[in-house]
Image (spheres, rainbow, N blue to C red):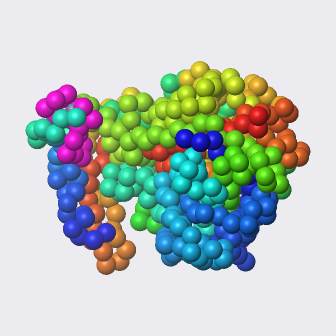
Amino acid sequence: MPSPRYHREMPQRYRLEAAKCSGCGRVAFPPRMVCNCGSRDFKGEKVSDYGKILTFTTIRVAPKDFETEVPYSVAIVESDNGVRVTTQVVDCKPNELEIGKKVKFVFRKLYTEGHTGIICYGYKAILI
Amino acid sequence: MREVAVIGCGMTKFGELWKKSLRDIFVEAALKAIDDAGVDRISSMYVGSMTPGLFVGQEHVGALMADYLGTPQIPAVRVESACCSGGMAFRLGLFEVASGHSDVVLVGGVEKMTDGADVTYALATAADQEYEVYHGVTFPGLYAMIARAHMHKYGTTRQQLAMVSVKNHHNGALNPNAQFRGEVTVDQVIKATMVADPLTVLDSSPVSDGAACVLLASMDIAKKVNKPAVKVIGTGAATDTLALHAREDITTLGSVKQSAEAAYKMAGLKPSDIDLAEVHDCFSIAEICIIEELGFVDKGKGGLFTEQGHTSLTGKIPVNPSGGLKSKGHPVGATGVAQVVEVVEQLRGEAEKRQVKNAKIGLTQNMGGSGASSVVHIFTNA
Ligand SMILES: [Zn+2]
């Protein structure tokens, strides 16, 4: 992807930076300008490093960038401070995943863009 | 707003139409719709198409289609809302006639998916590129996560999911325009190639080419044309978070529920008044969630309802008599309009072997992405 587009998302992908709404207390990830409650006032917050699996799957037919990775597990994880994300769950076998299991976010490589593109990093989850 | 009717409809066969181009299939469907109604002019045109730019490298398809339909002067615009581009195009055409601005509007949907583009990538652009697709999730993966959550929360079984595909293939086998006209068994669905656990390739709608068109007109014109008018009596549309993970409840398709409620309210009807429905079964689990959101059955009971045969051609509420996206095919932008074509044929009594008996009120539900947009229409032949 073009580097400005990649660069803009780095605070979220590398450091899980979020924003807490001053109106309703909801944590927005990624940060946004307007909350669903109508408030435009946010304070910096971080997505908790820990969370649990809400649902998951094993991808067996992947997009081109991930073709060499199959099969890999993807889950929707809810962090301890209520942020939900889609993330890979790694360092385990697909059959070890269960709804409700605890996970921790870790910093990992996601994929490489073709042969000459940039290496894309971000968060993944591991079972704890 | 004045009353509006569908006065003509037509579609191509859905499937791998390698000998025909994007413009060919659109014009074929449009001419069928025009001939079906027997009108000699249209005022404007809406073309539902998700991503012709990625599939065949062509944008600006509103003007392209007006040109090749031999009507290069009329206003024509493409409408995009991922897989519900066709349904949303229909809604805009409806408003244009209802407002009194135009008397006859052509609404079409078209997609050419088998020309060699990276289909998985193109479809994934309907999800959140930065926060879903970046992490390697696919559309089958998103619906698989809905399926897993639904099974966990409500006890929906793997067999019940398969029964959606079995039923839709049974109906599609009776539809001459369907891409796959063969029956499948529960066992075949479950044992087919796994795409994203627990969904197999037979839980998934196929990659297709195809186009569908309808003509919308005011009632005074509708009374003068070839075929009996099918009135549009309800419309509703809604959106939800683009990312599946941002929803309060992963098993609830809020946009479907809200779009249905708006359409029911406008029509002055309730779910039990509907005689048949064409719904967006892009994956087996989607049909189960949708029949719950449409109010045909309580939340969580969609699997059991399907297992009990209530959604079959002869059931309490026949769902996807056309074969649905699963068997009829899913050229994404065309799907929402093809659903209208099926309901119109059913309400005219032209659906032959898949005819739902005594059909008076039909509903279409078309959805984009993992449910981030949905549009519902209600029709009557009364
Ligand atoms: Zn708020």
Q: Is residue B297 above or below residue B339?
A: above
Q: Position of residue B103 (x, y in %)?
A: 63, 55
Quadrant occupied by the C terminus of chain B = top right
Q: Main secondary structure of the magenta part?
A: loop
Instruction: Report the image quarter containing ligand 1.
Output: top left
Residue placed furthest toward the front: B220
Q: Is residue A127 above or below residue B156?
A: below
Q: Position of residue A18 (x, y in %)?
A: 18, 43
- Residue appearing at x 16%, y 39% in the figure: A40
Q: How many marks?
A: 0
Of residue B201 and residue B376, the one placed in the foreground of this image is B376
Residue placed furthest toward the left: A43
Q: Position of residue A126 (x, y in %)?
A: 31, 42
Of residue A5 and residue A89, the one placed in the foreground of this image is A5
- Residue appearing at x 38%, y 52% in the figure: B128
Residue stretch rendered in magenta on the structure: A20-37
Q: Is residue A110 above or below residue A112?
A: above
Tell whether B90 sits left or right of B127. Answer: right
Tell whether B147 sits left or right of B42. Answer: left
- Residue appearing at x 30%, y 74% in the figure: A117
Q: State yes or no: residue A24 in magenta.
A: yes
Tell whether A124 sits left or right of B158. Answer: left
Residue placed furthest toward the top: B298
Tell whether A24 sits left or right of A77. Answer: left
